[in-house]
Image: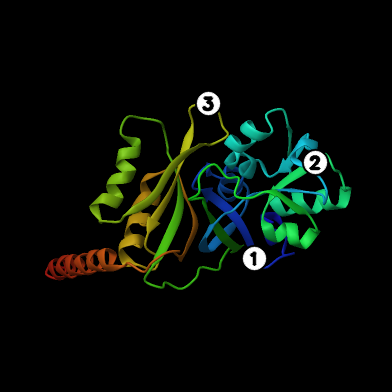
């Protein structure tokens, strides 16, 4: 899907980025970080209900193969170990593709992990419903579009960046985090990913509250870019969830007061 957007075959792509059970969808994150020149347009958080789908008339005892996207299969690990311990797991690109391909094959010994909507669309039976390991199952999705298109700030936004170090040294991550702490910018997610350039070499992917158009966020990103080997900007976009910009608004006001103060002092310098 991301490749289709880069080629211009699609205007936008909706891709999973994080699941509350299984964590980060690494293939999505790595593609955005290392391979694609795209920007996140917004985030969406959806509750996820996974089901075991099969051809009409098939029973659980008939199933010897289960197909789905590996991230979905992993969310149902306990069910599969309990009900289908010897099943062969086959990877698909998505739950929708798994259901579609199963319907096309007509294989009575194969099941797909997917949604009830997929079962309805492709004429499949639901052999078992709600098979995810934890009931509070949610997935965060990115809506991704072409580079050069940053959504306008809404007052309830997130920004995602990737920080690349010049060298691995003590305190390197602390130095990055201090830039945010000094400006009272809240981080909602922080993780490291290998740079693909050798063991022990990592970059840091950071989600933060705020928009690149905010003075405080812009100032922070400017300082990071000047001090690190590189900073890749993945987007500023409307955040999912409740609107809660009060802390960021107060921080922005404090920063503007401080900026007015320093500009006043600099205006007194003899030229």
Label 1 or label 3, whichever lies nearer to me, is 1
Instruction: Please give left or right for residue 235 compared with residue 88 in the image.
Output: left
User: Mark 1 falls on what kind of element?
Assistant: loop
Neighbour tally class for label 2: few under 14, some 14-19, many 20 plus, Cα within 10 Å: many
Residue 229 appears in view: no
Residue of label 1: 12
Residue 114: image location, x then y, percent: 68, 51
Residue of label 3: 199
Sequence-first disc among 1 and 3: 1
Neighbour tally class for label 1: few under 14, some 14-19, many 20 plus, Cα within 10 Å: many
User: Mark 2 falls on what kind of element?
Assistant: strand
Q: Residue at x 63, y 47 (%)?
A: 35
Instruction: Please give left or right for residue 25 compared with residue 166 in the image.
Output: right
Neighbour tally class for label 3: few under 14, some 14-19, many 20 plus, Cα within 10 Å: few
Residue 218: image location, x then y, percent: 36, 62
Disc on res. 110: 2
Q: Quadrant of the N terminus?
A: bottom right
């Amino acid at each position: 899907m991301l490749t289709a957007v880069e080629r211009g075959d699609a205007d936008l792509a909706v891709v999973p980025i994080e699941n509350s059970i299984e964590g980060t969808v690494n293939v999505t994150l790595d593609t955005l970080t290392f391979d694609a020149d795209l920007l996140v347009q917004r985030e969406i958080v959806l509750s996820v209900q996974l089901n075991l789908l099969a051809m009409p008339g098939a029973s659980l005892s008939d199933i010897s193969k289960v197909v789905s996207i590996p991230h979905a299969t992993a969310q149902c690990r306990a069910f599969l170990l309990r009900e289908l311990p010897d099943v062969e797991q086959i990877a698909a690109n998505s739950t929708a593709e798994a259901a579609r391909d199963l319907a096309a094959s007509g294989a009575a010994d194969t099941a797909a992990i997917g949604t009830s909507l997929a079962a309805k669309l492709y004429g499949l039976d639901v052999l078992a419903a709600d098979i995810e390991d934890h009931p509070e199952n949610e997935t965060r999705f990115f809506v991704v579009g072409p580079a050069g298109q940053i959504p306008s700030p809404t007052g309830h936004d997130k920004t995602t960046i990737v920080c690349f170090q010049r060298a691995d040294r003590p305190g390197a991550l602390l130095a990055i985090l201090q830039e945010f702490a000094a400006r009272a910018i809240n981080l909602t997610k922080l993780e490291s990913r290998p740079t693909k350039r050798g063991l022990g070499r990592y970059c840091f992917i950071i989600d933060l509250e705020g928009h690149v158009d905010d003075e405080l966020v812009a100032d922070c990103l400017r300082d990071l870019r000047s001090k690190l080997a590189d900073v890749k900007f993945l987007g500023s976009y409307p955040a999912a969830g409740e609107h809660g910009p009060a802390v960021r608004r107060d921080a922005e006001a404090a920063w503007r007061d401080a900026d007015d103060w320093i500009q006043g002092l600099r205006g007194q310098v003899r030229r």
